[in-house]
Amino acid sequence: MKTESIAFALAGVVFGLIAGWVIGTQQAAPRVPAAAAAPATTAAPAAESGGTRAALLDESQVTALKSVASREPSNAQPRAQLGNLYFDAERYDEAIQWYGEAVKLAPNDVNISTDLGVCYYYTNRPDKALAQFDYSLKLDPNHTKTLLNLGIVRAFGKQDLDGAVQAWQKVMTLSPNSPEGQAAKRALDSLQSAHTGISGGATQKPGD
């Protein structure tokens, strides 16, 4: 079975997870004061003229957060929060701008780094996404949300099924009963169902 076909077979089970887990990462991050903070909610379709968008951008929150960021040039949190807002609105290039500034100010924050990596993936830059996840894993080699997303990007962005399996198996080993561990198990089970050459370890190479 071709690698591309396997990826499509998995899409219904796995593809949506990357959005869900980056939202989870955002929820884990510290928030700016409530007056300027945006709630981390799962994006939902919203009609706009000429098309749809997952969530409307709350301009009042954007203005408040930009004001905080301007007053506090060394504070990463309002910038990360702006990244969250733009992410929820599917404005990934703008989310990258703010997450990037936040990472520069808080280079040891694995959650912000991983959020940035997911945005790179959504803007069709899987190599940059993987590089950012590598950076996150240098900060925390056992960060399960990063590992889960790493597997998704390897599977869908690079058609690297061996790499995806390794990442998901590590999540299952580290935290088998967590939501991340259960998601990794479902993804791996679906991959194994679609390709009999995949077992507990490496996969067969495409065409073998």
Image (cartoon, rainbow, N blue to C red):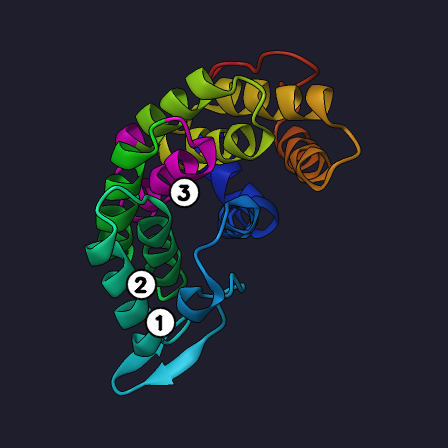
Q: Residue at x 34, y 33 (%)?
A: 106
Amino acid type, mark 3? Asp
Residue toward you, 22 or 47? 22
- What's the CA distance linking mark 3 and mark 1? 19 Å
Q: Is residue 124 magenta?
A: yes
- Hey, which quadrant is residue 4 in on the image? top left
Q: Marks 3 and 2: which is nearer the front?
A: 2
Circle 1 residue = 61
Residue toward you, 40 or 193? 40
Q: Residue at x 37, y 62 (%)?
A: 85
Q: Please, what secondary structure does the residue beneath circle 1 have?
A: helix
Percent x, y of residue 116:
34, 41
Amino acid type, mark 2? Leu
Q: Is residue 89 left or right of residue 198?
A: left
Residue toward you, 168 or 73? 73
Circle 3 residue = 115
Circle 2 residue = 65
Which disc number belongs to residue 201?
A: none
Percent x, y of residue 141:
53, 17
Q: Is residue 16 left or right of residue 191?
A: left
Q: Residue at x 30, y 76 (%)?
A: 59
Q: Main secondary structure of the magenta part?
A: helix
Compared with 32, 2 (above or below) is above
